[in-house]
Amino acid sequence: MKKSPHKLFISQQIKRFFLSALLICIVGCESKEIVTSEEVGIDPESSALTSTDDMRAGSGVLGDRSLLPGGPLYEARCASCHEGGVYKAPHKIWLEFMSARNLYQSMTEGIMSSQAEGLSVVEKRQIIEYLTMEPFKESDLTPEYQYCQDRNQLADPYDPKELVGWGHDTSRFVPREVAGLALEDIKNLKLKWSFGYPASLRARSQPAIAMGSVFTGSQDGTVYALDLDTGCVRWAFTASAEVRTGIVIGQVDSGRKLAFFGDIIANAYAVDAITGELVWKIRTDNHSSATLTGTPAFNDGSLYIPISSLEVTAAADPSYDCCTFRGSVISVDAENGELQWQSFSIPEEATEVGKTTAGARILSPSGVPVWSSPSIDSANNLLIFGTGENYSTPADGNSDAIVAVRLDTGERLWHRQIFPGDAWNVACMFVDNPNCPVENGPDYDQGSSPLLMTLDNGEKTIVAGHKDGRVIGYRLDSESLPLWEVKLGRGSIQGGIHFGMAAEGTRVYAPINDMNDTQNGDFLDPLLARPGIAAVDANSGEVFWQHVQEDVCDPEIRFCDPGISAPVTAISGAVIAGHLDGFVRIYEGATGEVMWEFDTTQDLQTVNGVAAKGASISGAGPAIGQGHIVINSGYGLYSHEPGNALLVFSVNGD
């Protein structure tokens, strides 16, 4: 990453260089001792939020948000509904995440048109600028697409063997016949084409490759089917809000090929994968802060949708009554979206248990969202998913757990809590915010999918990566002791292991984030950090190798880190990782040697003419198929650098 508006003080730059050099020395010498900052005389420093606005990257050209003319207009026209007054109305935090295009359409022709009646065009734009904190651009409302000449035809026939990764198999392993890449090809990979997402500062939807096309979501709510060979647009579908989930391709009983996905205001969709025509759309949860982040799983005509929320952020307001959301997984008929069952992560609804010092009600139990894609064992009628933290005190026994339910009914069979007593919300990232639960974290939710593994002896187990930096092997029950565990990183609220591991046979690839400033007030000792990736034996927990990535970030770029937050993807003999420093690196599976790397942070010449560059890679990992590697780059949220690029690589760029 070469450019950023964020600047560090000189003292911080010097300290970063010193820490990087010291860490390289420690790791390079394979020190057996754990050296801490206290032992080498480094004063602990940490940072905390002063506003939830700090969680989003932006240009800053509009200046002080409190002075924008759209603020009073929002308070007069919108606040009464979007700050808890109407249960189903998306909370203000979601309006702030929506694109100018989504907001304008909602106010002019959508559900908010009656509330916006009487507002001038200028006033509507002022509200949008207040919410997005970016200048309103007319061109963002009607993006132009470079359509393929044969856009409503299949580039290649439908092949169910191509359906790999999240939505089908959480191991994120791509067999050689699907990947179309051999180890000897990797050194010859070159950028084939790139695509710029219009009006975007983040690119965090997991792409899918099928039928000669790349399917991907975007920040402005557009879901694209792009030609894998050229990048031309086969179709573009406009969802109601940003699509963060992966795109899942599947064939339903009627023979129709559908693309499934969800948006950040908890709508789930099925569109025709050939034409982009809407087949069905459902609201998955009526809570005002509900969202879809985890990629839905498709199996035998049913779609299993994990439901999360950002009530965890709404609770940063000291007057907010925290909290009422509870996570769940729902099963719907993939043909028509009809609900088949819903399995809540907390069996009972929240009730008032007290008040904060600010007078806000404390409602509990709450939270326990489901962030990640579920794992399916259809042979044993099992669906397994991970849960997040409680949002309010007291913490209960359902948070930070691995849960198993019946695939056909959603009935809970067992759950295993990993971190008891974890209640946390974004109020805890501020100093003395009364809405922070007394537990104050550690916010170690299960953000990565538990992997269903078959060991060499035939036993079926679960291998899970955790935010505290551990990878643990479990039996499929709630009571037995872990088979093994290994500590690979220091951990933080963003990992440790954050969004997902991959497995090739019984070799598990565990990416480690271990960023040093998560802006939550914690001091995270940089000398204990192990950002990078490791390979672990699922049979025993033996560490085959561990690569700790050197910090090559420009010290003037505050939100550049060497670790891996994004899920990784495995092929035969190698694993592909997108790092928070904007590099894509390919590691040899047997040794951990870096075989190839590419810096995505450069300005890119895109096939659609939209100015684009990559940045921090997180949330989504590489998609591999038909001799191509496809990856999104840019994550302008939660202390990461903004970008808006999709990059496609192939052997020699052919």
Image (cartoon, grey):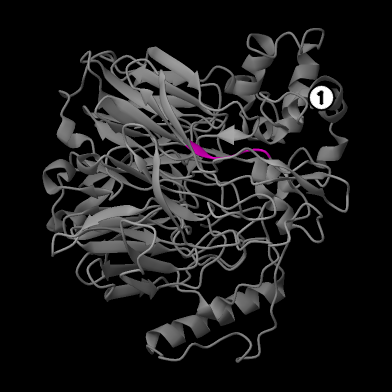
Residue numbers of the magenta segment = 324-328
Is residue 29 something one can see in this rendering?
A: yes
Task: List x then y, in percent, for residue 502.
Answer: 30, 55
Q: Quadrant of residue 434?
A: bottom right
Residue underneath mark 1: 80
Task: List x then y, in percent, for residue 396.
Answer: 60, 54
Asked if residue 8 lies left or right of residue 545, the reply is: right
**Residue 593 part of the magenta segment:** no
Task: List x then y, in percent, for residue 302.
Answer: 31, 26
Q: Quadrant of residue 260?
A: top left
Asked if residue 402 lies left or right of residue 638, the reply is: left
Q: Residue at x 77, y 31 (%)?
A: 83
Q: Residue at x 18, y 44 (%)?
A: 179
Task: List x then y, in percent, for residue 154.
Answer: 21, 19
Asked if residue 223 lies left or right of residue 517, the reply is: left
* Residue closer to the observer: 578 or 377: 377
Asked if residue 558 lies left or right of residue 407, the reply is: right
* Residue closer to the observer: 147 or 432: 432
- Eyeballing the image, is 471 above or below 604? below
Mainly helix, strand or loop, the magenta region? loop
- Eyeballing the image, is 68 above or below 359? above
Neighbours of disc 1 within 10 Å: few (<14), some (14-19), many (20+): few
- Eyeballing the image, is 542 above or below 298? below
Which kind of residue does numbered mark 1 sit on?
Ser
Q: Residue at x 27, y 75 (%)?
A: 542
Badge 1 marks a residue whose secondary structure is helix
- Eyeballing the image, is 278 above or below 405? above
